[in-house]
Structure formats: C-alpha cells, structure tokens
C-alpha cells in the first residue's frame, strides 16, 4: 500500500488555521464595534433634550455595551469644579456628591489634557482617587473627555471595572469615539435648549414673554375644561409709567420693569406663570385658582407694589409706583384664553379711567 504525500499548500493552510480563526474573531469584534458606534451616533441624534439624550445614551451603555458601572461628570461653569451629573445606580447612591477640579486625580488629568486615560490596575496609580473613598472596589479605570467645539473639556465619562486588566487594549480609543459622539450631541442639545429658553423669555426682565404665555395659556385652559377646574388671569399695568421714562429716562424705566417682574415672581406660587405682556403690562396666569382667590392675590400685589417699589432718583422726592389690575376667571368671564385676555384688558381700562391704583374684578 502506497501513501500519497500531502501537498505543501494543504499543510500550510492547516498550520494557518489558528491564525485565520484569530483574524476572523478580530474582524467580528471590529464589525461589532462599528455597529456600536453607529448605534451611539443614532441614539445621540434622536433627541434635542439633554435629559432624554442622556437617558437613551445610558440605556445603550448598560444594555448593548454591557457597561455595569459608570458616571458622567460635567463642569460647573460658575464653580469650575466637575461634579457627578448622572451614572449607574451604585455610583449615584454612594458618590453622587463627589467633585474634583482640573488636575486632581486621573479624571482631573483627563480634564486638563483632553486625553483619555486607561489604567488596568489603579493600585499602581499614585494619583488615582477612588471618589474620596466612596468607591474603593474600583480595580481598573477608564476616563475619556467630552470636548466642545472650542476644544474646551466640559465633562468626562468614567467607566469602572472591579478586577484588574478588565479593559480591552483598544477600549481607550473605542470609548473615546463614543464620548466624541456624546459631546457633539450634548453641545447641540444645549444650544437648542438655550435658543428655546431665549424664545420663551423676555430679554429685559427674564420672565416669560407674550408668545410663551399665549401658548401656555391655551394649553392650561384646555386642561381646566377637561378637569372642570377654575383658571384665573391678572392683567397688571404700571400707572403713569410714561412719566417715569420722561422724568428719569428709559434706562431707569427699564430698572423699574426689572424690579416689578422680580416683585411679582416673589409673591406668587411656583405653579403660577408671570409674563411680560408688552411695554409696562404684565400677566399672571393662575391655574386651579377661583376668581375670589385671584382677586385677593391681585389686591395683595397692588399693595406690595405701592409699598415696595419706590422711585428715589435724584433730583426729586421719593415717589411710589402703583398698578391697576384687571382680574378675570374661567369659566365665569370667558370660555377661551383670548376671551379672558380681552375681558381682563376691558377691566384694566375701566380701572385706569376710574382713577388707577385699583383692582377691577
């Protein structure tokens, strides 16, 4: 019996099988990472609200990337320190109050340099801070920066492992790409929210503007109808405000408007909406408030303005400011929001014609 010699290329192919298997596994991991980065990008594009964005992103970390312990730390623009903004349950429960400054600990070095740091064994890191002893079980640590368009680090994403060598060699680059996606999405969401807030608020006084009031008022009236609840509205006008501008100038007149907005805001409930309706007119929307209570509040506000809002510009004596208020309520005075405003304006005009400094209910 003769035996044929196995071809040389067959022997080489068999010898290379382990390498092929290894290469195949490597390609599978790379493809999965590309899928995860695509998923991150898609999740980060799904919402322009920061809270919803982070909720979706953390779900991706937990459920798809299998990251068990992590936290996002953002810089407080006023204090300058970085504080825990959100994270896994264990981190939030034990280290939710932790803060650090630029240069403090490994995360502080990341914030300083803008470069990610991966430590496979934190026991060898002299500058590692286990959240001031709040999380002593951390064995491996990864911190990646969130960098804004102006190249400033505004946050860090920290990921913890409970055993040394718990990270893959390429996790530093992979989670750096994940953090880049998150940073761009957060910056976009913040710009959107800032523009939305500016569109809702009066530039001078900082309270809500007429546009927001009209939208909110229509929604609240629908809710009042649905729940068979009262809804009241106060239209407030500063008396003789033109004389203030003519006597002391528009700059001082603006200061009076700012003080007026602050006084009204301080004297209503958190659920009430104070807005600048135009010029020297203000509107307060009072959900779930019957007419009698609204008129009582209006009278208290009238007295507070007369007592607290004083003009003491030189030259001239100290002069008190007064307001006239038109008070209306749903359902007795009108069935829709525009009707309420018209009726309040009619009563305000009656109050002005009748001598000012009074509430017309």
Image (spheres, rainbow, N blue to C red):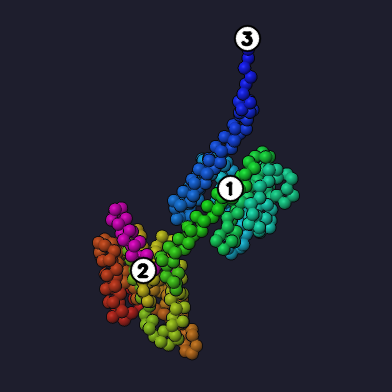
Q: Are marks 3 and 2 in contact (CB under 8 Å)?
A: no
Disc assigned to residue 239? none
Q: Is residue 32 magenta?
A: no
Count how many numbered circles sit on residues in the image: 3
Q: Residues within 10 Å of mark 3 (few under 14, many from 20)?
A: few
Q: Is residue 75 left or right of residue 193?
A: right
What x and y, as percent, mark residue 34? 52, 44
Residue placed farthest to the bottom in the image? Answer: 315
Answer whether residue 349 is visible to the viewer in this image: yes
Residue 265 higher or lower than 176, as above or below? below
Disc assigned to residue 210? 2
Magenta-colored span: 207-230
Tell which of 172 and 125 is nearer to you: 172
Q: CA distance from mark 1 to mark 3?
A: 62 Å
Disc assigned to residue 1? 3
Mark 2 or mark 1, earlier in chain = 1
Answer whether residue 298 is visible to the viewer in this image: no
Q: Is residue 219 magenta?
A: yes
Mark nearest the camera among 2 and 1 is 1
Q: CA distance from mark 3 to mark 2?
A: 102 Å
Q: Which residue is mark 1?
A: 175
Q: CA distance from mark 2 to mark 1?
A: 45 Å
Q: Is residue 250 left or right of residue 122?
A: left
Tell which of 353 and 246 is nearer to you: 246
Mark 1 or mark 3, earlier in chain = 3
């Amino acid at each position: 019996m003769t035996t044929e010699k196995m071809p040389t290329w067959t022997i080489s192919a068999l010898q290379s099988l382990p390498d092929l298997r290894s290469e195949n596994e490597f390609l599978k991991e790379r493809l999965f990472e590309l899928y995860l980065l695509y998923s991150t990008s898609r999740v980060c594009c799904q919402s322009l609200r920061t809270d919803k964005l982070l909720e979706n992103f953390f779900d991706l970390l937990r459920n798809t990337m299998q990251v068990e312990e992590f936290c996002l730390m953002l810089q407080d623009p006023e204090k300058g320190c970085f504080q825990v903004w959100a994270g896994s349950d264990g981190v939030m429960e034990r280290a939710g109050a932790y803060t650090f400054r630029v240069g403090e600990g490994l995360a502080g070095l990341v914030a300083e340099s803008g470069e990610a740091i991966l430590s496979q064994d934190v026991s060898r890191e002299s500058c590692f801070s286990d959240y001031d002893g709040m999380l002593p079980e951390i064995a491996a640590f990864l911190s990646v920066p969130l960098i804004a368009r102006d190249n400033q680090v505004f946050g860090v994403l920290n990921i913890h492992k409970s055993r040394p060598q718990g990270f893959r060699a390429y996790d530093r680059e992979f989670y750096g790409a994940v953090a880049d996606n998150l940073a761009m999405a957060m910056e976009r969401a913040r710009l959107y929210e800032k523009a939305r807030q500016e569109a809702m608020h009066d530039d001078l006084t900082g309270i809500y503007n007429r546009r927001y009031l009209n939208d909110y008022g229509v929604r609240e009236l629908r809710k009042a109808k649905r729940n068979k609840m009262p809804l009241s509205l106060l239209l407030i006008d500063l008396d003789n405000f033109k004389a203030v501008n003519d006597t002391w100038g528009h700059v001082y007149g603006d200061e009076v408007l700012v003080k007026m907005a602050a006084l009204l805001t301080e004297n209503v409930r958190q659920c009430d909406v104070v807005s600048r309706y135009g010029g020297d007119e203000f509107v307060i929307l009072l959900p779930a408030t019957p007419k009698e209570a609204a008129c009582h509040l209006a009278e208290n506000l009238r007295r507070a303005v007369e007592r607290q809002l004083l003009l003491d510009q030189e030259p001239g004596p100290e002069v008190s400011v007064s307001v006239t208020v038109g008070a209306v309520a749903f359902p007795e005075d009108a069935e829709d929001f525009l009707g309420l405003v018209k009726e309040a304006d009619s009563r305000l005009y009656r109050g002005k014609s009748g001598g000012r400094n009074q509430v017309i209910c």
